[in-house]
Amino acid sequence: MNNKSKKVLLLSLEKVFANIEKQKEQAIQELSDFVAIPSVSAKNQSLDEAAAYAAKLLKQNGFVVKQFETGGGPVVTGFMDVGAPRTLMIYDHADVQPAEPFDLWESDPFKLDIREGRLWGRGVADNKGEFVGRVNAIKAYLAAGLQLPCNIKFVVETEEESSSKNLTKYFDQDKNFFDDVDGCIWEFGGKNREGLQEFVLGVKGILYVQLSVQTMTIDSHSASATHLPNAAERLINAYKLLKDSSGKILIPHFYDDIEEISNEELEVIKKYNFYPEKIKEHFGITTFRYGLTDEEAKIAYFTKPTCNICGFTAGWQGEGGKTVIPKEATMKIDFRLVKNQHPTTIQKNLRAYLNEHGFKDVQIDWSNGYPPSKTAINSPFVQLCREANLQVYGHEPAIQPTSGGSGPMYLFGDHMPVVSLGSGHPDSNSHAPNENIYIDDFLNGMKMIATIIDQFKSWQK
């Protein structure tokens, strides 16, 4: 884009940005009303109410809205079809994490509080604030008398914080909605500790399993440890088969299909500031696991799969001693997966591997998960978002090729490029007490969405 085109683009956005500032109080009130709905999906609480509120905001701003039942939390979609050759999709969620422990909050988590230039409340960062901001960005764009240069689709689910366990049931009902979409803005994001906006271009996949074993019908006195089987030891021995002391996962074919990272991706990772010393200070450690150097730890975070014990239960857990041999034990394990690994295949190989080594008695009680997703760094949509970031924030974004965490991005990423960005900051406390965002970041997030939309003028078919 030449300088003349940039000036025209910026002039067209001046009124949009002014409208965003004018709408500030109304947007904050809408966020306040949304935060007041305690839509905790882990408790199946107020999900219908949250979906109804999301639908209401979309309808008020000119979207054709549909609601889909899934057998769990509903999914709401919105479509604004202006007959443009390209289409932008936005994915958000209307549910939140549990707010407990309540006594650690400085204000009621379900009552928006404004102090210190910030908005405080459960969901302001993850993800109700983003949804309200994005709708208001479109409202401000239209109020400026501008014609949208792209069609816009919203998908708002209500179980993201519970592993999106019914999102595929929605997807099966509405597959055509994902046709002819040119790019998707994902739910989360923000600035890092250097004040630079970050883009996340993917997420790892996940397989979460609960293993269990029962070796006796009742617990026994530990005097009989000479000859009676111990369920805890049995399960620990099974886990020891899964990876070696260097962290290499030993399940057959685990690494077979993994996609090699490109030189371009590796360069982006090398440029990314991982803040290794801050991480060590925060967690009270002096070195990273497996003796990894700072650079090796960073590369592993973005590119390597994992096998991790999340919890282990066996025997006496109460205060003081009780000399028993536990009759049963359970272990929760998550595997973070990288490009081309699939949870169904990993679980199948896990079961066969345990059986082959004499652990048929170790049960997989339940499992859940989904595949990874990743957008190419050189995608035209990524470049469009980078140009918007330059205009709004005045700098190139810091890019994470993928997040270390997981989400249902694959449902979207299989059809379109996806960029995750937003209005958060390093101390937003998204899953913790005192969740917050800065008001200025809330407004700038709206300006970013408006600018991304405006960029579609120069990205025509």
Image (tube, grey):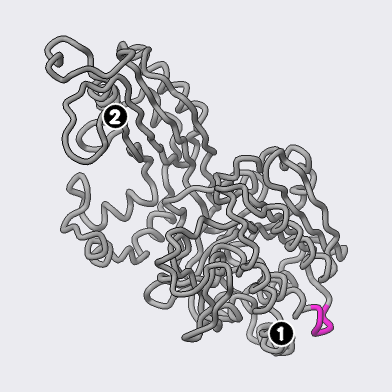
> In this rendering, which labeled residue sits more in front, label 1 or label 2?
2
Q: Quadrant of residue 252 in the image? A: top left
Q: Residue at x 73, y 59 (%)?
A: 154
Query: How many numbered discs sit on the rendered protein?
Result: 2
Q: Which residue range is magenta in the image?
A: 142-146
Kind of residue at disc 2: Ala
Q: Nearer the viewer, residue 61 or 234?
A: 234
Spatial distance from mark 1 to mark 2, Cα to Cα?
Answer: 56 Å
Would residue 119 be found to the left or right of residue 362 on screen?
right
Q: Residues within 10 Å of mark 2 (few under 14, many from 20)?
A: some
Residue type beneath disc 1: Gln
User: Picture coordinates of residue 448 (x, y %)?
Assistant: 62, 75
User: Does residue 64 lie above or below 15 as drawn?
Assistant: above
Quadrant into which the C terminus falls: bottom right
Instruction: Report the disc number at residue 23.
Output: 1
Rendered residue at 42%/51% (across/down): 404
| Residue of label 2 | 314
Instruction: Decide if residue 80 is on the left or right side of residue 334.
Output: right
